[in-house]
Amino acid sequence: MSAPFIVLEGPDGAGKTTLAARAAADLARLGVRHLDRRQISTHSTYAATLMEPLARMLWHSGDAPDLSDSFWAHLQAAWFTAHGEQVVAPALAAGPVLVDGWYSKLASRLPGQGWSADEIPHLFARVRRPDHTILLDVDPAVLWERKGDQMRPAELGMHGTYDTLGRSSFLDYQQRGLDRLRATAAAENWHVLHVPAGEPLETTAFRTTSLICDLIATAPTTTGARP
């Protein structure tokens, strides 16, 4: 049996990467390792060669709308399949793995982009699922105040049906995605960490680390297969 695979999920700007890195550092004594969701394989040179252009297309495309959402969604599914096989799986042999976001955020956006409820599970059916998912539930208005001037077009709602991109589109787009993440959390028994406005980073980091520590200490491990 492998060690637990844990994912921090949440809307854009929720602080997933910062909190995952902090939690892994605080729980290093338990063997917890933080893996960036953009990490290219270090297990296989061949896989790394293929994953490098995938990562470049997904995160360095300049948010060009030239290709349809169908292309980008299938590319994401391919990426998370490769990441699960080539990055997560080898790391789990050494201890618990913590990743700063998985495919759920993307899946939460697709219903608003014309995808049916049946298509989305099928698209990600072969992607490794986390043993535990923690939803960072942060009000989009708080996220806008934190880093509204740093948001990319895709985060502002480029894939939606907005006439202009800005604060209004961001709040609507992110809220719709967050509502779907909340629904998924309820249906799949995720752990939800509500982050109120004004909560210091130190407090959020402590609560996140404490929850992860409890999951590692008390929960049985699984194979990561779909139930």
Image: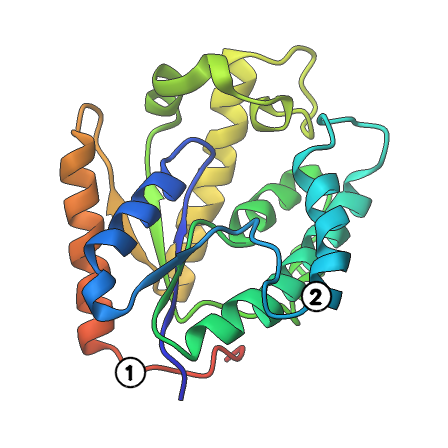
- In depth, the one of 108 and 5 nearer the eye is 5
- In depth, the one of 194 and 98 nearer the eye is 98
The residue wearing badge 1 is: 220
Instruction: Please report the residue visible at 57 percent of the width from the left and 49 percent of the height from the top.
Output: 38
- In depth, the one of 91 and 66 nearer the eye is 91
Q: Is residue 14 left or right of residue 125?
A: left
- Assess whether mark 1 and mark 2 are in contact (beta carbons under 8 angstroms): no
Q: Quadrant of the N terminus?
A: bottom left
Instruction: Please report the residue visible at 80 percent of the width from the left and 46 percent of the height from the top.
Output: 70
Marker count (numbered): 2
The residue wearing badge 2 is: 45
Alpha-carbon span between mark 2 and mark 1: 33 Å
The kind of residue tagged 2 is Thr
| Badge 2 or badge 1: first in the primary sequence | 2
Q: Is residue 38 left or right of residue 199?
A: right
Residue 186, percent from left and from top: 37, 58
Residue 189, percent from left and from top: 34, 65
The kind of residue tagged 1 is Pro
Instruction: Please report the residue visible at 34 percent of the width from the left and 39 percent of the height from the top.
Output: 18
Residue 153, percent from left and from top: 63, 21
- Residue 51 drawn above or below residue 70: below
Q: Residues within 10 Å of mark 2 (few under 14, many from 20)?
A: few
Q: Nearer the viewer, mark 2 or mark 1?
A: 2
User: How is the structure coloured here?
Assistant: rainbow
- Residue 51 drawn above or below residue 199: below
